[in-house]
Amino acid sequence: MQESPSGPGFPKHFDGKRFYNPDAPQAPGLLDALRWKLTTRPERSPSFIADVEQSVPPRRVEASGLRTTLVNHSTVLLQQRGSNILTDPIWSERASPLSWIGPRRRRKPGVSWEDLPPIDTVLLSHNHYDHLDLPALRRLAARGDSTFIVPPGVARLLRSHNIGPAHELDWGESLSLAGLTIHCVPALHFSARGIFDRNTTLWCGYMIEYREGLVYFAGDTAFGPHFAQIREKFGSPRLALLPIGAYQPRWFMSPVHMGPDEAVKAHEILAAKTSIAIHHGTFQLADEGLDTPRKQLMACAPNGSFLILNNGQFAGIP
């Protein structure tokens, strides 16, 4: 890994070998993870919930309105003016490197693979298995015509699996595409796909700049000052995709994941016209139950401006 420059307007986050969260708590280590697993008991959830009504998105949306479909977890399909963007796509049965162990899917995707329209741009926020699903990415690459945008260090993994073209963006860097610009923005998280590669690649969110306004995809992130920094740099988004799940126990998860109450604070700091909850309801990754984040958000979210969609449900954003 070559030295990564700090993106303009955002603090340094690379020490020459590994990335880190500047001026913020770092992700817990292995001993903390062992303590978590040995001292807590997760809330019970059904092994599978067959309540998803799959939808069939149009191949293209030519109007200025933004059609936003929650596929599952952090996978969202954004369609506007002929552009189709997909965030952190996962269709696998497990968020794991192995087919027989690891977090198992509890709900099916809200859009079947066969009904997925052409995808112009794929945004990957970091390399965790519930966000970077190689089988889905290989299938997207095989269809052709998709551009993959990733944080520093991740393109090498994609290219090793013949997935591309892959463009790396550091915090503060941008890429102009047909009719829109993708800006890479900070997140507070960590990266790893194995035991020895921790934080050798970066994590991020993205601000998508359309002519009609801004869409913010937060990726995976803890609560922190970056939300105010992002609003100061870009202005308020018309839509924010904010994670609400995998937050218990707080002593372990708070450096890397927001709880629903913190997602509401982020929504307010960003002054987003509308927010949609992501990172919940499909995989149980922490101690709270599968649908506990939804219930907690419903209890504290502002009426009407913070949406909780089911897998397959879509919202029209003016």
Image (tube, rainbow, N blue to C red):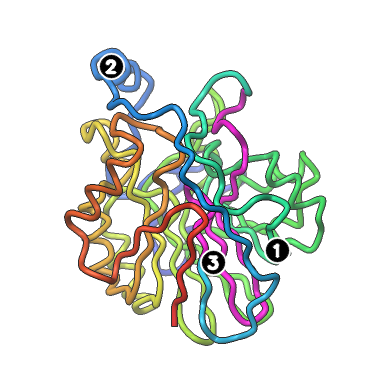
Q: In this view, does 179 lie above or below 1?
A: below
Mark 1 and mark 2: span between their CA atoms? 44 Å
Tell which tag, 2 or 3, sits nearer the viewer: 2
Where is mark 2, residue-wise?
A: 35
Disc 3, SS? loop
Q: What residue type is labelled 1?
A: Pro
Q: Position of residue 14 (x, y in %)?
A: 46, 47
Q: Are the two marked residues, 2 and 3, in contact with CB atoms closer than 8 angstroms? A: no
Residue 37 percent across, percent down from the top left: 32, 17
Q: Bin the neighbour count of mark 3 within 10 Å (Cα to Cα): few under 14, some 14-19, many 20 and up.
A: some
Horizontal side of 315 relative to 253 (left or right) equals right
* 61, above or below 51, in the image: below
- Name the kind of residue labelled 2 in the image: Arg
* 113 left or right of 174 in image: right
What residue lies at 24% left-to-right and 15% top-to-bottom? 39
Mark 2 or mark 3: which comes first in sequence? 2
Q: Give, as a single range, the part of the protein colored magenta.
A: 69-98
Between the C-alphas of marks 2 and 3, the distance is: 38 Å
Indicate whether 267 appears above or below 132: below
Residue 117's mark? 1
Quarter of the view holding residue 94:
top right
The secondary structure type at the circle numbered 1 is loop
Residue beneath disc 3: 173
